[in-house]
Image (tube, rainbow, N blue to C red):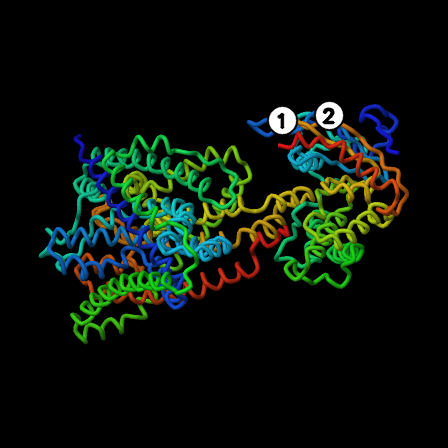
Amino acid sequence: MALRHTTDANTDLRASSVLDCQSLCYKFPNSKTIFADVSLHTRKDEFVAVVGPTGTGKSTLLRVIAHLIPPTSGRVLLDGVEVCRPSSRVSLVHQSIATFPWMTALENVKLVLSGSRMAEEEAARLSEKMLSLVGLGGAESLYPKEMSGGMRQRVAIARALAASPEVLLLDEPFVHLDELTANEIRKEVYDLVFNPETTLKSAVLVSHNLHEVVQLADRVYIMNGSPARITDVVKIDLPRPRDDHHPRFHDFVDVLYRGLDIRSIR
Amino acid sequence: MDLIAPLATLATLGRIFALIGLSIVTGWLLAYASIRNRRFEAAYIPLVNVFESIPVIGFLPLVLVAFVLALPPPFGVEFAVDFLVFDAVAWNIWIGTYQAFKTVPEHLVEVSDNYGFGFFKRMKELYIPHSIPRITSNIFSSFADAFFYISVSEVFTAGAATAKVCPGGTCATFGIGTLITEYLSTGNFLGVYYSLASIAVAVVAVTFALSRLSRWAVAKYGVDTPGAIRRYAGRWRGMVPSPWRAVRAQMRNVSRVAARPRQADLAGEGSRRTGALKYGAYAFVVLILAYLAYSAFRAATSVSASTWYGFLRETPKLLEYVGADYLRVTVIALASLGLAVFAGYFLATHRRTGDAVLPLVQVFAAFPAPAYFPLVFIVTLPFLEHALPFFYSEVYILVLGFLSCFYYVFFDFWIGVQAIPSEFDEVTRNHEIPFMTRMRRVVFPSTMPYLITGLSSTINSAWAGIAIGEFWPNIAPTVAPKGLQVPFGMMYYISSNMADGQIAAAAYVSVIFAVIVAVYGVAFTRNLMDLARRKYVIEEGIFAA
């Protein structure tokens, strides 16, 4: 069954954290507090998910973790060092699949290497390798409008991976894809997190799809309320690769569903 | 000082806003005709683009023949002035309305088709509301343009040609432009300051009102905009005079009957009604064009064959003049672009500074440069004349040109940067993409449609400053008896010939200019715009099925 523990109970876990978010709070200017006292962490080779009713600020939380929005209070540590500005070591994949329409798949990926002082050929080679990792070998010269939604999201993931991140933040990355494509990319993403050819150490997924969360996550943080807080943490210890016909799979889905306070939806 | 300056300002404002109102109503009809008929659209849009590019001065020969010399004195001059102000305000409102009508969401059009909306209901409930945000934002440019031209449009000189209808050959109508010109020619600087203060009050009040109106219009009529809609119903009710309320109540009763939902009109009655309106719009356009063509024909036939031959022989020289002016326009456009890109990007990405600085830029842009420029000229002339004895006039022209147009590309670029979806901004920040790469690979391509529109308007409007600056004989008679003049330029040629009553010569070079502008419109604006639409639509980069 699910193993539950509070976020600050296990200091040993904290010590081995890749990403350590401590008491994060975010308040929109001249508006109410969106979330408060949110602490979460990820360890090496761990896939963490955040679920919560709509409006609890999950997407905002990812942006705060990436320091695209500075927190109102609290701090984010990456390998024990405080994150004080956006860095590609913490790389975000958006919910709306964002690829530059005037760039080919290869150029879209290569763009994030422009600040790395990498030689042009090396950047091209690395970009090709990342595209190949996400199953887009041979599609390097296609423009986004010549690709399906699934292919575009693969480009966005390849772009995030090319930047050599340690943590991948995934903001409902499969929500605009059909179920078959989404399922296929979910498997690829999971394999990528634990692929030695990438620099990734862990990933944080935000999703409304509880089946998806149980399929991917090792640990799930549940957010509720207004301002939102972490109300529960669920460890999912199903064997991998996960099968949604496993007898405990739906138990976990039920646990997560019960953990969501849908009355707090704003 | 008496109330003459405020009254003159009010007269000018009244004229400008009445003509803005006329532009809006005609714009709705013409835009509707355009979206309903491809052939009309194919003629209408290039024609408006050409008209938009010709500076007010280019129309002077035409208005002289069509209005001043054709109609009795007070009406002829007033209509001529109104036409010139209309030229300054109408085109961008017409184009903005057309673009708004063209981009009404398809599913809303389908809803109105489905429920068989007639012309009036379709306009009232769909097209007009959808056009309001664009029109309100375009009113600002129209207002700024109209004010910029007041010193040229409210008072113009045509020498002997108009001596019979205007005292001393100078045609003028009551307004702040005329008043300032009069004060400057008599050296009454107190009057000039008083007039400038009066304009300043008007510009600040109008800019404030327009920005509020624009914000409200975007919040209420924009499709899925985040702004909150403010409701004024209670307040307006008290402000509407009671007799009008009674009439309006009657009209509502009538419109309730007319607006009753009905099933789709399978027999095509609606399309017959729409057809009648379409032909009404055609008739309106054809009537105006026919009158202008007739006037042009009269002007052409009133000139002897030998004079025409003389003009033809002068054509190479005139083309050199056009080239010189295009060089000036290029310098002004590049300076405006440079300012837009660096200051515009900074203000768009630093919100607080932007909130503080942008209203000031807006007020400055709307404040008519020709009204205060003579004072700048008087103060700086001794220094510039000494420092740049051969180029000081050129500097004044370039500055005047810059002041007349920099804000188009500035504001368009600023809006373009704001319109970049946040996801792309986050990608560039997340991956620490260097500033120059970000500008080159992301910001410029993303804002390309805005840059082309803004740059095109900037280039079109740069002619305004050049037109005034190349020949300004009475800019400051006290310090520069000859005024500000640069004899090597097309605008100088047009203005000086007009002042000498040589209408045919001015008209001839105006026609050459119109042809060049048309070619430029096709070669530059349309091709670049097509490229931008084909390749640089940032919204296409977001996939949200």
Against A27, residue A203 (above or below) is below
Mark in front: 2 vs 1: 1
Vertical side of A32 occupied by A52: above or below: below
Give how far across and how far down residue A89 sits, in percent. 76, 41
Near-viewer residue (A9 or B192): A9
Q: Return the mark for residue A23.
A: 2
Q: Which type of secondary structure does the marked residue at label 1 adopt?
A: strand
> Dividing the picture into quarters, in which one does residue B311 lie?
bottom left
Q: Where is residue A31? Give x, y as percent.
A: 57, 27
Q: Which mark is residue B443?
A: none
Q: What's the residue at 40%, 36% (across, down)?
A: B212
The quadrant in which residue A145 appears is bottom right
- Three-letter code for the amino acid on which mark 1 is drawn: Thr
Res A33 label: 1
**Left/right of residue B116 with respect to residue B375 in the rendered view:** right
The answer to whether residue B406 is visible is no
Q: For mark 2, name the chain.
A: A
Residue B395 in picture, x, y percent from top left = 36, 49
The one nearer the camera, A260 or A125, is A260
Q: CA distance from mark 2 to mark 1?
A: 13 Å
Q: Which residue is more in the foreground, B451 or A189?
A: A189
The total number of labels drawn is: 2
Residue B240, picture quadrant: top left
Seen from the viewer's position, the closer of residues B137 and B501 is B137
What's the chain of the residue with tag 1? A
Amino acid type, residue under disc 2 in the picture: Ser
Q: Residues within 10 Å of mark 2 (few under 14, many from 20)?
A: some
Does mark 1 fall on the same chain as mark 2?
yes
Q: Secondary structure at mark 2?
A: strand
Q: Residue furthest left?
A: B164
